[in-house]
Amino acid sequence: NSFVVWLRAPFEILVARLEAATKRPLLAAPNWRHTLAEMARGRELLYHRIADLEVDTSVSTPQQLANLIADEINSPRKN
């Protein structure tokens, strides 16, 4: 058995996070924002289809997200 969590974020948040990154291969591409948008569009349907839980990472702290995910995984309906 597995439990798939999609850590989702709006495109603008992804861009901001990548702009702050220093060692990401995607940033080496001249048109990396376009590449990111294409990747996100291509993956969104698949991720939505396979995820047991979708979590918007733009509205909570990492600790809050971890607690939410742990609560979902450990809930009686998941076991």
Image (cartoon, rainbow, N blue to C red):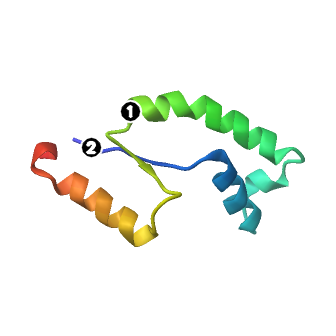
- Name which of mark 2 and mark 1 comes first in the sequence: 2
Q: Quadrant of the N terminus?
A: top left
- Nearest to the observer: residue 12 or residue 74: 12
Q: Which residue is mark 1?
A: 50
Residue furthest to the right in view is: 30
20 to the left or right of 75: right
Type of residue at label 1?
A: Ile
Q: Residue at x 41, y 28 (%)?
A: 49
Residue 77 horizontal/vertical position (percent): 12, 43
Residue 6's label in the rendered image is none
- Nearest to the observer: residue 58 or residue 49: 58
Does 43 appear above or below 16?
A: above
Type of residue at label 2?
A: Ser
Q: Which residue is mark 2?
A: 2
Residue 42 horizontal/vertical position (percent): 62, 30
Residue 25 horizontal/vertical position (percent): 75, 55
74 to the left or right of 65: left
Q: Say what secondary structure mark 2 lies in.
A: loop
57 to the left or right of 11: left
